[in-house]
Image: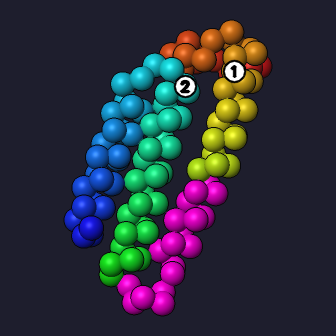
Amino acid sequence: MSLQSYLVISIILFCLGIFCVLTRRNAISILMGIELILNSCNLNFAAFSRFVTPPDDISGQVIALFGIVLAAAEAAVFLAIILAIYREFRTISPDETDTLKG
């Protein structure tokens, strides 16, 4: 596979993630869209590291690994926030949770 193939797959993932974030009304679906966007960025880092940098340079893979760790931490924090919102408002719809707890 060539670099262009990886970039096309990354663009498709990114566009699906943006579409999911902009059109969904459920907080869990928005989280899944953000995860797709992060995975497309990780795919770009790994692909450019494989095809553009010298063979012994693994900096792109290391950055992608940090991106995976960041995505896991982001998912854990976001799910904790969703649980707290559900306990307070009894819904996870972002449109209905527009007030702060005083």
With 95 as the anchor, is 66 left or right in this view? right
Asked if residue 74 is positioned above or below residue 52 in the image, the reply reads: above
Q: Give left or right: position of 47 versus 66.
A: left
* Within-10-Å neighbours for mark 1: few <14, some 14–19, many 20+: some
Q: How is the image coloured?
A: rainbow
In front of the other: 95 or 52 = 52
- Region in magenta: 53-70
Dot 2: element: helix
First in sequence, mark 1 or 2: give its number.
Answer: 2
Q: Which residue is mark 1?
A: 85
Residue appearing at x 42%, y 88% in the figure:
55
Amino acid under disc 1: Ile
Query: What predominant SS class does the magenta segment belong to?
Result: helix
Q: Is residue 33 above or below residue 29?
A: below
Q: Which mark is residue 27?
A: 2
Q: Image quadrant of residue 36?
A: top left
Residue 41 is situated, as x and y percent measured from the top left of the image, at 42, 58
Tag 1 and tag 2, C-beta contact below 8 Å: yes
Q: Which residue sits at x=46%, y=60%? A: 42
Lateral position of residue 22 relative to residue 7, left or right? right
| On-image quarter of the C terminus | top right
- The residue shown at (69%, 17%) is 86
For the point 64% across and 57% down, the residue is 69
